[in-house]
């Protein structure tokens, strides 16, 4: 059985470290939880968080959930989708699982080299009479080409559901990324750029779909004596909402800290042939700097990504092959029969390492990591 044990004596530089608010700020909220004795089920902090979140995301309807995955899975259920959903294999397990657990079939579309998001030019050839939706991912917080995707969806009458798990706080021009698509799912997992310990939310355009979603995350209960849908339990509790209220205040400050760290990587690695970092598809994208993916081209460097990974680990610098393998290559999806149909995604997954990256990462450490890389090449 695969069981990961927690070990307390790990040393080194890790790929991520959760942002925590000052403890006193969280304790103030804990006092309020103790006063009210409400721990979950859309309590006062949940409602306060929901309002602040809607304001931050600049949307009418936004529903917090126990995590991002359940928000995505239940949003698909609320849309009542049955058929094929065009999606990307260059993502976390959750995206593909949400489709399959709804009884739908994932159809994998290739991604763009420049930013790893779904390639709009490759969508239309995958559309059949069974296609019901497109489910792209704003991977690493890089926005998909939302204009092109919307055009295609409109033309073919398809729903668009964005996996925006990485994209909290991203803007395209003046517009918040949450304003695109029929649904956007955000993840507030501890390792994401904004966290509520575990948590997430769904932004849903259609009021009726939002109401159904709201019921689905609470067992499909409509009233004391009426259960209308086969729902689940995906509510956000008061402790998570409290963490969200604390962290939301510090989001911008942390974003700017991550931006500064990111720019050191960019500066130090610039000009090394065979090393590449991503670029958003528009110049006016306001990034959230949620990850620091770096792509190592073995043909140019003469050293494979896996060698870089091992060498770094020998120096107690822990990177992550994120995303590798593609979800279409998972054992559980072998039966779908994909084999090399998304060559760009496949190549990128063999080149990528997300580097140690978080708001409080010391500048000297980043320079050391980059110097180590330079020595290798
Ligand atoms: C983290 C993540 C999810 C799932 O979010 P959880 O809050 O961990 O359930 C979904 N999709 C992507 C791309 C993610 O990175």
Image: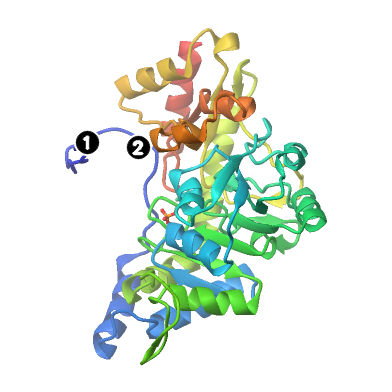
The x and y percentages for residue 282 are 76, 45
The x and y percentages for residue 42 are 40, 82
Residue at 48% over, 65% down: 74
Question: Label 2, on which residue?
Answer: 14
Tag 1, which secondary structure? Answer: loop
Q: Quadrant of the N terminus?
A: top left
Measured in 3D between alpha carbons, the distance from the residue under mark 2 to the one under mark 1, in whole angstroms, is: 9 Å
Asked where in the image residue 222 lies, by quadrant, the reply is bottom left
Question: Label 1, on which residue?
Answer: 10
| Residue furthest to the front | 129
Relative height, residue 346 to residue 97 (above, below): above
Relative height, residue 273 to residue 149 (above, below): above
Q: Nearer the viewer, residue 308 or 97?
A: 97
Residue at 45% over, 40% down: 357
Tell me whether circle 2 and circle 1 mark residues in contact (CB < 8 Å). Answer: yes
Count up the numbered dots: 2
The x and y percentages for residue 261 are 52, 41
């Amino acid at each position: 059985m695969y069981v990961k044990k927690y070990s307390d004596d790990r040393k080194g530089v890790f790929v991520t470290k959760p942002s925590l608010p000052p403890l006193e700020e969280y304790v103030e909220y804990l006092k309020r939880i103790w006063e009210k004795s409400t721990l979950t089920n859309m309590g006062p902090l949940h409602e306060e968080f929901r309002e602040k979140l809607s304001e931050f995301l600049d949307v009418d309807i936004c529903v917090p959930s126990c995590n991002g995955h359940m928000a995505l899975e239940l949003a698909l259920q609320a849309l009542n989708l049955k058929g094929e959903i065009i999606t990307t294999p260059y993502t976390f397990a959750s995206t593909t699982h949400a489709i399959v657990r709804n009884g739908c079939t994932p159809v994998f579309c290739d991604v763009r080299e420049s930013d790893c998001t779904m390639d709009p030019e490759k969508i239309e050839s995958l559309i059949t009479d069974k296609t019901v939706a497109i489910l792209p991912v704003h991977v690493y917080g890089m926005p998909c080409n939302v204009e092109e995707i919307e055009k295609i969806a409109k033309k073919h009458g398809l729903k668009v559901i964005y996996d925006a798990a990485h994209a909290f706080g991203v803007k395209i021009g003046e517009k918040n990324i949450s304003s695109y698509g029929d649904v956007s799912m955000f993840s507030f997992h501890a390792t994401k750029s904004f966290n509520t310990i575990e948590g997430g939310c769904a932004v849903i355009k259609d009021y009726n779909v939002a109401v159904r979603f709201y019921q689905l995350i609470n067992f499909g209960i409509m009233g004391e004596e009426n259960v209308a849908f086969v729902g689940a339990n995906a509510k956000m509790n008061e402790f998570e909402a409290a963490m969200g209220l604390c962290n939301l205040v510090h989001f911008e400050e942390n974003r700017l800290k991550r931006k500064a760290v990111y720019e050191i990587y960019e500066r130090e690695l610039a000009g090394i042939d065979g090393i590449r970092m991503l670029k958003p598809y528009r110049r006016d994208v306001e990034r959230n700097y949620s990850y620091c993916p770096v792509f190592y081209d073995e043909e140019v460097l003469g050293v494979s990504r896996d060698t870089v990974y091992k060498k770094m680990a020998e120096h107690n610098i822990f990177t992550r092959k994120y995303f590798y393998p593609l979800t279409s290559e998972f054992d559980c999806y072998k039966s779908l029969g994909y084999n090399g149909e998304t060559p760009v995604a496949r190549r990128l997954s063999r080149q990528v390492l997300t580097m140690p990256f978080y708001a409080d990462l010391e500048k000297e450490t980043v320079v050391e990591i980059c110097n180590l890389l330079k020595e290798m090449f």
